[in-house]
């Protein structure tokens, strides 16, 4: 029968050839988040539609055009999550996290859904790696989140990404600016597209995002948001920029950057990659001072970001440490292979079959390789395998193993008895085989008077 089913438009399967790399990138993210004290939250894939309407905003494209909404059998209006900030804030309020020690630092990794026109880098089911810091201290929290984001991208091997940052001001700055901008645009209505005319009454700031050359020209003469900023918003932005400079983070102030979600206040940012064409934003984020209150909590400062994982993988550098993550993160198994396969006698298992099973019993992830050496090598690289073991001898138990460590290029010749302990060293970074940490004890001469 002819093939009938395909993955729905705008979605795709992530197959084993790629999924190891996805897992490796996520493992690097988890490690960096952990270092900054962020812990994982997993929220439902669908939420009440009203949550996004309130949280993300009725005037946003996401809520206006892109949501996968449905009515369930109990007549509830539900929506597949188009983003995760609103849901994380919902969980923060629902579980009384404001009573925990502040700030509360959360991260998430998972699929999001938007009904958009699919193209390169734009999917209807896509994946985000995101973080939200709630109950923080304004500019310092913005800077902490940005430093963590830059650290993460640096650890993934990125060197040429651009950090764009701007302030959309606080509520007072924005309402003053809205008035000035609407006044200017009203006097040039004839130059505005239908979309922009609609935004003029719903969310005029979004017009600044316009890609049309005619509107760009018009906007060049428009009042600038920075001229409407309150003293507080000005100081907030200066403090964020100063903290980034203090830690040598290169960034570009981008006065037109306003972002497409309604909850932002003050700091907003995006990270763009030249290699991505028109969908060039790898990550977007910013601060949101009113969202927790909007969703029923008490006023709480929030700031966060979400990386588009699909896009991140599209431009992941060729020398990214994630590509050899098997060594550090225990993603891939050791591949064991023999160069020459003997015909097996009845009742006999192959040398490789036996060795693979013995390795697994010693705790070393391993799989059987077969075929020509180059094929085995290609497969090992694709699986992010840390090593290949070639068995030179033909019968179990009677010979040396040739080990090729992929990440370092080392070649070792070992007896089978030395194999597991040696390979464990190459997996040990992940902590997978470490015995429980020894109790902390200081050498006697390290104890100072203060501590006695
Ligand atoms: P966003 O800018 O809508 O922000 O999405 C963040 C990132 O998700 C984008 O920069 C992009 O890389 C990726 N992305 C968005 N839509 C698609 C798509 N259709 N296909 C592929 N990738 C896509 C948010 O979602 C906010 N919740 C970020 C945030 C967190 N702000 C504060 N905290």
Image (cartoon, grey):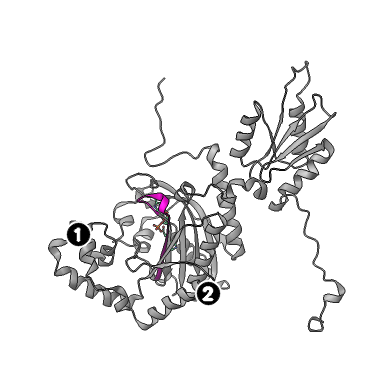
- x, y (%) of residue 281? 40, 56
Q: Nearer the viewer, residue 292 or 159?
A: 159
Mark number, residue 214: 1
Q: Nearer the viewer, residue 174 or 410?
A: 410
Task: Indicate whether residue 273 is drawn in magenta.
Answer: yes
> Is 239 on the left-hand or right-hand side of 50?
right
* Secondary structure beneath label 2: helix
Question: N-terminal of the two: label 2 or label 1?
Answer: 1
- x, y (%) of residue 138? 47, 75
Q: Nearer the viewer, residue 415 or 202?
A: 415
- Is 9 drawn above or below residue 42 in the view shown? above
- x, y (%) of residue 449? 82, 84
- Is 198 drawn above or below residue 289 in the view shown? above
- Split into quadrants, the picture shows ligand 1 in the one at bottom left
Q: CA distance from mark 2 to mark 1?
A: 39 Å
> Is 294 on the left-hand or right-hand side of 242?
left
Instruction: Tell me the magenta residue range.
Output: 267-280
Mark number, residue 165: none
Task: Indicate whether residue 392 is drawn in magenta.
Answer: no
Please tell me how crowded label 1 is: few (under 14), some (14-19), or many (20+) other residues with Cα within 10 Å. Answer: few
Residue 135 appears in the figure: no
> Is 143 on the left-hand or right-hand side of 61?
right
Please tell me how crowded label 2 is: few (under 14), some (14-19), or many (20+) other residues with Cα within 10 Å. Answer: few
According to the image, label 2 marks what residue?
Answer: 246
């Amino acid at each position: 029968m002819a093939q009938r089913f395909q993955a729905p438009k705008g979605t795709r399967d992530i197959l084993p050839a790629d999924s190891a790399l996805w897992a490796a990138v996520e493992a690097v993210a988890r490690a960096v988040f952990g270092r900054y004290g962020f812990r994982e939250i997993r929220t439902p894939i669908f939420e009440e539609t009203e949550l996004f309407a309130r949280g993300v905003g009725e005037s946003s494209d996401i809520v206006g055009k892109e949501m996968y909404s449905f009515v369930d059998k109990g007549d509830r209006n539900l929506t597949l999550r188009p983003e995760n900030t609103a849901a994380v804030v919902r969980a923060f309020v629902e579980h009384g996290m404001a009573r925990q020690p502040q700030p509360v630092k959360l991260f998430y990794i998972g699929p999001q859904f938007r009904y958009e026109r699919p193209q390169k880098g734009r999917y209807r089911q896509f994946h985000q790696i995101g973080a939200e810091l709630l109950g923080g201290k304004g500019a310092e929290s913005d800077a902490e989140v940005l430093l963590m984001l830059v650290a993460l991208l640096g650890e993934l091997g990125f060197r040429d990404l651009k950090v764009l940052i701007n302030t959309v001001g606080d509520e007072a700055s924005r309402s003053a600016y809205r008035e000035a901008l609407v006044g200017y645009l009203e006097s040039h209505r004839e130059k505005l597209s239908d979309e922009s005319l609609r935004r003029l009454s719903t969310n005029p700031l979004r017009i600044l995002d316009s890609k049309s050359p005619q509107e760009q020209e018009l906007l060049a003469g428009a009042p600038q948001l920075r001229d409407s900023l309150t003293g507080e918003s000005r100081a907030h932005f200066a403090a964020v920029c100063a903290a980034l400079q203090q830690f040598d983070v290169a960034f570009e102030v981008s006065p037109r950057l306003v972002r497409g979600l309604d909850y932002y206040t003050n700091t907003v940012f995006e990270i763009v990659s030249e290699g991505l064409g028109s969908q060039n934003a790898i990550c977007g984020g910013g601060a949101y001072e009113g969202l927790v209150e909007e969703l029923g909590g008490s006023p709480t400062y929030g700031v966060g970001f979400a990386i588009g994982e699909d896009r991140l993988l599209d431009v992941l550098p060729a020398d990214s440490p994630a590509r050899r993550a098997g060594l550090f993160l225990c993603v891939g198994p050791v591949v064991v292979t023999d160069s020459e396969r003997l015909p097996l006698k009845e009742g006999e298992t192959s040398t490789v079959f036996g060795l693979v099973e013995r390795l697994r019993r010693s705790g070393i992830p391993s799989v059987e390789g077969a075929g020509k050496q180059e094929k085995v090598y290609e497969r090992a690289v694709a699986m992010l395998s840390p090593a290949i073991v070639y068995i030179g001898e033909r019968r179990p138990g009677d010979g040396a193993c040739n080990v090729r460590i992929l990440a370092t290029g080392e070649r070792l010749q070992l007896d089978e008895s030395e194999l597991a302990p040696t390979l464990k060293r190459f997996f040990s970074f992940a902590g997978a085989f470490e015995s429980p940490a020894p109790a902390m004890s200081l050498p006697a001469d390290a104890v100072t008077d203060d501590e006695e």
